[in-house]
Image: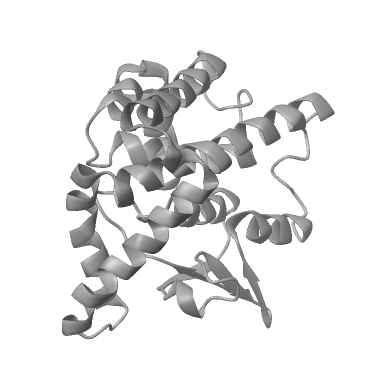
Amino acid sequence: MITLHKFIPAWGLPDISPFCMKAETYLRMTGAEYKAVVSDSRKAPKGKCPYIEHEGQVISDSSMIIEYLESRSSHPLDSDLTAHERAISAALKAMLEEQFYFVIAWARWVDPAGWNIYRPVIKELGAALGVPKPFIPLLEPLIRAQMRRTVYLQGTGRHSPDEIRRIGVNVVTALSDWLEDKPYMLGTRPHLIDATAYAFIASWLWGPFEGAIKDQVSQRANLVRYCDRMKAQYWA
């Protein structure tokens, strides 16, 4: 049995974190037996969620989790891919996790309108973790300041709001153009990249953060169909 340590659901999504959602989607794609536990990332081995406990081992980071489980699988999801397809998968994953993620983080933690939406969810997470209610308002500005600094040091936070939104729109456009009319990112069957792509696209499509990026996702019919397909297949 795998124990998945994650955050909380919100807005009809299984988790507020696209990385937690990615890991759990992967578990469902492989039919793994697991239980999910809401956990405090500060107590995680690398200071972040998700992480798993499995056969006496603790593995942190969504990619490391998947790599660990794939290495033990008799039917790895990417076993049929060519070297060219693996390169494409790696490029798409990097675009989502190393670029698009920080646009998401900016929209939630830095942008004032986004923070007003996200703040109640952070309060809910604090309550779920057993943080005493009087302490939550004291911790919020500290955590937000830390996230603002992270986004700034990474580089995304140095841009203007319009520039950041344009980065997000460009990522969405690239994904849609790549997907075309394929049912999954690499063809007719799902692969590892689909756990990542679904988590990040669905976070915008069904999340409450209105604006140019969500508009672009919603207007790209193939991405909407893609999210509906993944949800029906693994989250119905």
The colour scheme applied to this rendered structure is one colour
Q: Nearer the viewer, residue 28 or 105?
A: 105
Depth check, front residue: 227 or 167: 167
User: Against 222, is 86 above or below?
Assistant: below
Q: Position of residue 113 (x, y in %)?
A: 19, 43
Q: Going by the image, does 164 lie left or right of 126?
A: right
Q: Is residue 217 left or right of residue 68?
A: left
Residue 233 in view:
no
User: Can the viewer see residue 133?
Assistant: yes
Residue depicted at 78% across the width and 34% down the height: 80
* Image quarter of residue 129: bottom left
Q: Residue at x 73, y 40 (%)?
A: 78
Disc count in the image? Answer: 0
The image shows residue 183 at horizontal and vertical percentages of 52, 23
Where is 144 relative to 104, above or below?
below
Residue drawn at the location 60% of the way across and 24% of the way down: 188
Q: Is residue 51 left or right of residue 138?
A: right
32 vs 22: above or below: below
The quarter holding residue 59 reads bottom right
**Compared to 159, does 51 lie above or below?**
below
Q: Quadrant of the N terminus?
A: bottom right
Which image quadrant is residue 229 in?
Answer: top left
Outermost right residue: 83
